[in-house]
Amino acid sequence: MTLSQEPPSTQLSPIARIGSKTPSSKAPVIEMASSRFLPLGRTVQEIRIPGTECLVKQGVSLATLTSYRVGGPAELYLAPRTPEDLQAGLDWADERGLPITLLGAGSNLLVSDRGLPGLVVCTRHLRRTRFDEANGQVMAYAGEPIARLAWQAAERGWTGLEWAVGIPGTVGGAVVMNAGAHAACTADILVDTHVLAVDGSIEIFTPQTLNFGYRTSALQGIAHTASAQTVKLITQATFQLTPGADPKQVMADTTAHMNQRRDTQPYHLPSCGSVFRNPTPYKAGWLIEQSGLKGHQIGGAQIAQRHANFILNCGGASANDVFQLIRLIQSEVERNWSLLLEPEVKMLGDFQAA
């Protein structure tokens, strides 16, 4: 969810229940209560999707799957390892009328303490890469960490991805949000990306059809929570790099990018990285600092001393602590500068307004 002229929505639709839609003959009807509050000692239930190795799990903690280390459980959770299993999972959710939330590395998400309804599909195990020496292109599945891809390119002496070494997200997430750093971004090197719909069709998007902007693309509005019928999921992307450089030099340049991020940004505690987009011509961190908010803390969440555009989990933070800091920052910056900061972090679920 992106904040623009209005504060973030604090309400999701009611939790869908498995069996709420007449299923096909392949899948049994299974009724289960919301997983937000599993009874003490209850064993997490697993459901195998027929014809696959995919297990749908109930009540999986999303705090362990996001870089903030906060958030409640997924009502239902699936982590496919192949595109075929991913399609089977989408079909399974569609048969039951379940809302779907897509989760990659969880590095740019704030999940509500109340958890998420429906089926959470985690793509972090969808990993495969192929370097094509003939044309200097690399194809990667959506769950491949973009930083790992940068190191693999550097080891081969391929330039073009050095900037991505400090980005903690996946290839799919990098395309959706047009991730970038050091004056470079995903749009600069993307050749195309494959996007899967629930009916099994694949649409190939190019940079032109993705309408890339600063930390945004045409896929952002349909890349998180949606009905199975409307969800669109990146399965792979191809990037144009430049082979032929000295691997030692590319490794050195990549390492320098990594060191620069470590020296200037606080990565010693859980965070999502930069919380807000930079509103031209200002830097969000400078606006926050000038508003006197550096070091301000709510519960276990703190605006970082080293870089004010970071919110840190200093231990024991809740998602609502982070959410309240985001709202406070927006309020103070708007009061002082007449600017409404737009978050880069996507907020999913039901949050309590201050």
Image (cartoon, rainbow, N blue to C red):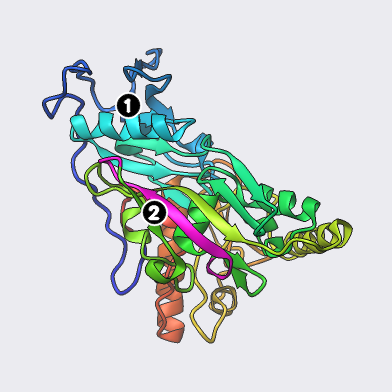
Give the residues drawn in magenta, as a range.
187-200
Residue 339 in picture, x, y percent from top left: 42, 82
Question: What whole-number distance in Å separates the C-alpha atoms at marks 2 and 1?
Answer: 21 Å
Image point (78%, 52%), residue name: 156
The image quadrant that residue 315 belongs to is: top right
**Type of amino acid under label 2:** Met
Residue 175 in picture, x, y percent from top left: 49, 58
Quadrant showing the C terminus: bottom left
Image point (31%, 66%), residue name: 7
Furthest toward the front, the residue is 134
Which of these two is toward me, 237 or 282?
237
Residue 145 in picture, x, y percent from top left: 60, 46
Residue 146 part of the magenta segment: no
**Type of amino acid under label 1:** Phe
Which labelled disc corresponds to residue 347? 2
Image point (57%, 70%), residue name: 188
Q: Residues within 10 Å of mark 1 (few under 14, many from 20)?
A: few
**Residue where numbered disc 1 is placed:** 37
Residue 190 part of the magenta segment: yes
Quadrant showing the N terminus: bottom left
- Give the structural element (helix, strand or loop) at label 1: helix
Tag 1 or tag 2, which sits nearer the N-term? Answer: 1
